DNA sequence: ATAAGCACTTGATAAATGACAAGAAATTAT
DNA sequence: ATAATTTCTTGTCATTTATCAAGTGCTTAT
């Protein structure tokens, strides 16, 4: 039950007292999942917030042609939360699945609500998490709308090179919004230089 | 000082008492802007949260070639808030500008903080707003990554047909991540059918 | 150890979209 | 009302990316 990585994540985001973090993470339970295992399935209602302590995972949808479109790649340490499903108790649109063996900490909506309304620092943390996530997503939309695939690939490589060692290229390709053959060609082109 | 549209926006999102909404919106001040006027400039730090009561506006960036990339289109009624700049007191990356004549209600971070920590219903509202915004943005990324321009155009037309009467097509084109000539051709193609 | 199944690459070709330029239409300013 | 400016459309051609199919190499299961 070593929650140090979970606790440190709070400290890494903003200044917060050790005791308060301890109180927040008190209710978190740990578990692990093997690689290629579904954490949360499409159409299910997410009842937990997850902290990914170790490993890589992703969320994806199946399009009309039954092709997997990776919507997000998660690399520890980070929170994994289907905001819409968790907070509005709606069915998820996407599938959350591990890529490598993963370890998690989870807590329920009930606990999140208690902390949110009773611990001012947790409120600030929650909001900060939203702000950061929103802002990242926003940058990604802008990139999608204005940069070509090669540029998006190079940016991802610069910003999250670790995923290239742990996530299959075809997953990365669909996350970038291109086919795996296009990504392969882009990589070939770049390696020439 | 008719805050009915502002107040109604709270009621439209979730059940909340009239008196509480009144308390929340107490500190909001109204103002208007002419068309094509900058509300918040790039590199400025956003000190206000805005509620767009009437009109259309957008956010955009200038890319390396000094081309405008529209990152978001806002149609009243809605909140307009540069989360990252407002909550983390960082310079904005984008320019917020009116498209039509607009009327706003604004309030300061100080007031938001007071409400956030003193009014449980406001906390819930704030979080809901984040959830909704995040989720919309997420849908947009998925669409960008997996649908072609024509499909994205048709979806936008279905979901926000009002903007086509009020926002220049070249703005909509760059919001969709395509050039204005491509959008023109897509529209021509569709009108044939 | 071997077979089966994935992941990745590569080739040929097609489809989608962009770049640039010119003109038409609409809007705005004088 | 007219000129100036901006928006939108259209043509031609280039670039980017997708599609499909085949082949190679790696990983996993038995």
Image (tube, coloured by chain):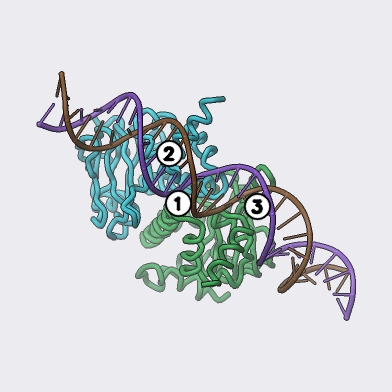
Chain colours: A cyan, B green, C brown, D purple
- Residue at (43, 58) in percent of width and height: B136
Mark 3 against mark 2, which lies toward the viewer?
2
| Percent coordinates x, y for residue A190 in the rendering | 53, 29
**Mark 3 secondary-structure assignment:** strand
- The residue indicated by pointer 3 is B68
Q: Residues within 10 Å of mark 2 (few under 14, many from 20)?
A: few
**In screen coordinates, is D29 left or right of B118?**
left
| Residue A181's disc number | 2
B160, B119: nearer the viewer: B160
Cα–Cα span, label 1 and label 3: 19 Å
Which is closer to the viewer, label 2 or label 1?
Answer: 2
Question: Where residue C12 sits: x, y (%)?
Answer: 48, 40
Q: Is residue A121 visible?
A: no
Which chain letter goes with mark 3?
A: B
Residue B26, placed above or below residue A105: below
Disc 2 vs disc 1: Cβ atoms closer than 8 Å? no
Q: Quadrant of the N terminus of chain B?
A: bottom right
Location of residue C29 (image quadrant): bottom right
Of all chains, the one bearing label 1 is: B
**SS of the residue at dot 1?**
helix
Are dots 3 and 2 in contact, CB under 8 Å? no
Residue at 34 percent of width and 57 percent of height: A64
Q: Nearer the viewer, residue B167 or B75?
A: B167
Measuring from the top left, give residue C26's x and y in whole percent: 71, 73
Sort mark 1 into few (<14), some (14-19) or many (20+) by Cα contacts within 10 Å: many
Q: Chain of mark 2?
A: A
């Amino acid at each position: 039950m070593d929650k140090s990585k979970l606790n440190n994540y709070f400290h890494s985001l903003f200044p917060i007292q050790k005791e308060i973090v301890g109180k927040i993470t008190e209710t978190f339970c740990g578990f692990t999942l093997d690689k290629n295992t579904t954490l949360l399935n499409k159409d299910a209602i997410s009842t937990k917030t997850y902290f990914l302590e170790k490993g890589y995972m992703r969320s994806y949808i199946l399009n009309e042609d039954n092709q997997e479109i990776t919507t997000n790649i998660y690399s520890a340490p980070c929170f994994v939360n289907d905001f819409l499903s968790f907070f509005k108790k709606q069915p998820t649109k996407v599938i959350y699945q591990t890529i490598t063996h993963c370890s998690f900490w989870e807590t329920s909506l009930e606990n999140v609500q208690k902390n949110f309304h009773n611990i001012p620092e947790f409120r600030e943390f929650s909001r900060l998490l939203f702000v950061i996530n929103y802002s990242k997503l926003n940058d990604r939309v802008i990139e999608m709308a204005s940069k070509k695939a090669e540029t998006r690939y190079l940016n991802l490589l610069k910003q999250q090179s670790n995923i290239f060692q742990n996530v299959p290229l075809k997953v990365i390709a669909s996350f970038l919004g291109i086919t795996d053959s296009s990504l392969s060609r882009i990589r070939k082109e770049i390696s020439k230089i």
